[in-house]
Image: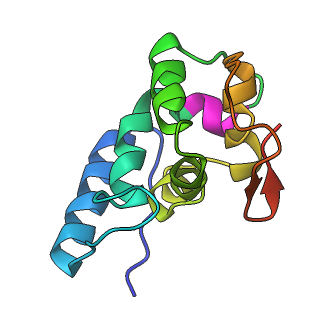
Amino acid sequence: EAKITCSNMNYLLCVVGFVVLLAIAGADGAGECGRNSPDMEAMKLIPCAEAASDENASVSRSCCLQIQKLGQNPKCLCAVMLSNTAKSSGANPEVAITIPKRCNLANRPVGYKCGPYTLP
């Protein structure tokens, strides 16, 4: 099993490389996020990288738009937040689950159980 670590400066390159590794390993099939794996969907949350690791960081509009889309499928949103890509990028699941609330999304999945966490 390969261990991948990412620094903040080469985050995008690392995420792309990780996704390529997943594709080579044959990570496919239908799951929480339909035809895309949670790790593939995590690519869409690159604008959320800082907000997912620092609860005091502001959440960008582009991050909120992506969270709003993913939030329509709470199972997928949860899988993305707990994905290997999110973890290897430095995201803290405890902080990441607060993003929908920090975006002030009215239709966010409040109370949805996401592994050991509950969406506020």
Q: Residue 37 in the image: x percent, y percent? A: 35, 61
Q: Residue at x 51, y 11 (%)?
A: 61
In the rendered image, the residue lying farthest to the bottom is 1
Horizontally, residue 70 falls left or right of residue 23, namely right
Nearer to the camera, 71 or 91? 71
Q: Residue at x 50, y 58 (%)?
A: 88
Asked whether residue 10 appears in the rendered view, the answer is no
- The colour scheme of the drawn protein is rainbow
Q: Quadrant of the C terminus?
A: top right
Asked whether residue 52 appears in the rendered view, the answer is yes
Q: Residue at x 35, y 58 (%)?
A: 34
Q: Residue at x 53, y 26 (%)?
A: 68
Nearer to the camera, 10 or 22? 22
Magenta-colored segment: predominant secondary structure: helix
Q: Residue 12 sits in which quadrant?
A: top left
Q: Residue 74 in the image: x percent, y percent? A: 60, 47
Nearer to the camera, 44 or 33? 33
Q: Residue 36 in the image: x percent, y percent? A: 30, 57
The relative height of residue 10 versus residue 103 in the rendered view (above or below) is below
Q: Is residue 77 magenta?
A: no
Q: Quadrant of the N terminus?
A: bottom left
Q: Which residues are magenta?
A: 50-54
Numbered-mark total: 0
The relative height of residue 95 versus residue 50 in the rendered view (above or below) is below
Q: Residue 108 sits in which quadrant?
A: top right
In the rendered image, the residue lying farthest to the left is 24
Q: Is residue 53 magenta?
A: yes
The relative height of residue 10 versus residue 106 in the rendered view (above or below) is below
